Amino acid sequence: MTNTKMHADEVETDESLVRRLLEAQFPDWSKLKIDRVSSFGTDNAIYKLGDDLAVRMPRIESAATQVDKEARWLPAMAPSLPLAVPVPIAKGAAAEGYPWAWSVVPWIAGQDANTARIGDLNQVAIDLARFIAALRLIDTSGGPAPSKQNFFRGVPLRALDRHTRDQLATLGHSIDGIVSEVWDAAVAAPAWDQAPEWIHGDLLPGNLIVSQQRLSAVIDFGCLGVGDPACDLVPAWYLFSGESRRTFRHATGADDATWSRARGWAVRAIGGLIYYADTNPAMVSQCRHVLAEVVDDFRAQT
């Protein structure tokens, strides 16, 4: 986990800035203890506020629209979801030199799945599959299409083909050549031909909260959108393996085409190897783990 600057255009924040923003805009909370949270997250800086709240501040301009999106959709979605989600409580305005809106959300107790002790990964696989299924059933009317606003999560993979192949070429022999074959198969798989569905877009272990060894919450809906749900199956390689991966696939009902496209989305971890090479070693390590899992899974099924 890291608090270091990860983006060239990142806006720096600290506890003093958070205190000043609260004093001016939400004085009732301004005397609470403020602690920066070390996390795998890259889009937002998180500060624990007292015992029950958190302040969430975009680090970069491309993440700034997430505040309004979460405020718009999470209150309506939360009652339909089987796990807790951080429904925003308040929206702060740009001030004190900080350029964007920011939010106050509930603090959800537990540890992320990167660091938590998990009792039964098969049960986590089932619980996460139920969450994904519930999300996909929510009415998509007015939902945001995948685009730059959610880093293109949920678009047809062909739209990312050239960019991905350029990244593969950049990495060259530093990664297993089978990764390119996985991408080829994913792009060649039948595209999603049904109505677009809600996707979380970023179901990485750092956004999955575990309490009492069970999956209890899903956080960070910044990549929320309406598109191809295959991208929400990437926990198959980020978190699960072997039996738990098979359990997850069965519980999600993913057919061969969807599973292949999902592996393609997992291959997109190559971007993390390049972008965070010098700034986020934990993310780089996670990306290398994912690619190894993808290669092993692909070999086992071909």
Image (tube, grey):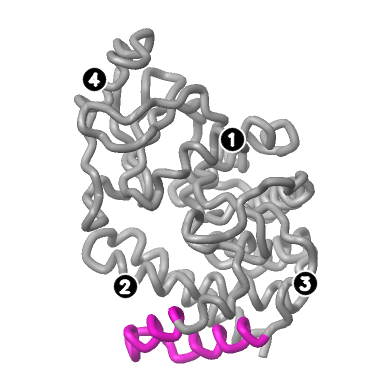
SS for dot 4? helix
Q: Earlier in the sequence, mark 4 or mark 1?
A: 4
Which residue has dot 1 on it? 72
In three-dimensional space, the C-alpha distance between marks 1 and 2, rounded to whole angstroms, equals: 33 Å
Left or right position of 249 against 200? right
Which residue has dot 2 on it? 274
SS for dot 3? loop
Q: Position of residue 241 (x, y in %)?
A: 60, 67
Amino acid under disc 4 = Arg
Nearest to the eye among marks 2 and 4: give it: 4
In three-dimensional space, the C-alpha distance between marks 3 and 4, rounded to whole angstroms, equals: 50 Å
Closer to us: 120 or 36:
36
Q: Residue at x 65, y 50 (%)?
A: 124
In three-dimensional space, the C-alpha distance between marks 3 and 1, rounded to whole angstroms, equals: 27 Å
Which residue has dot 3 on it? 193
- Asked whether disc 3 touches disc 1, contact meaning CB atoms under 8 Å apart, the reply is no
Left or right position of 233 against 53? right
Which residue has dot 4 on it? 20
Amino acid under disc 1 = Arg
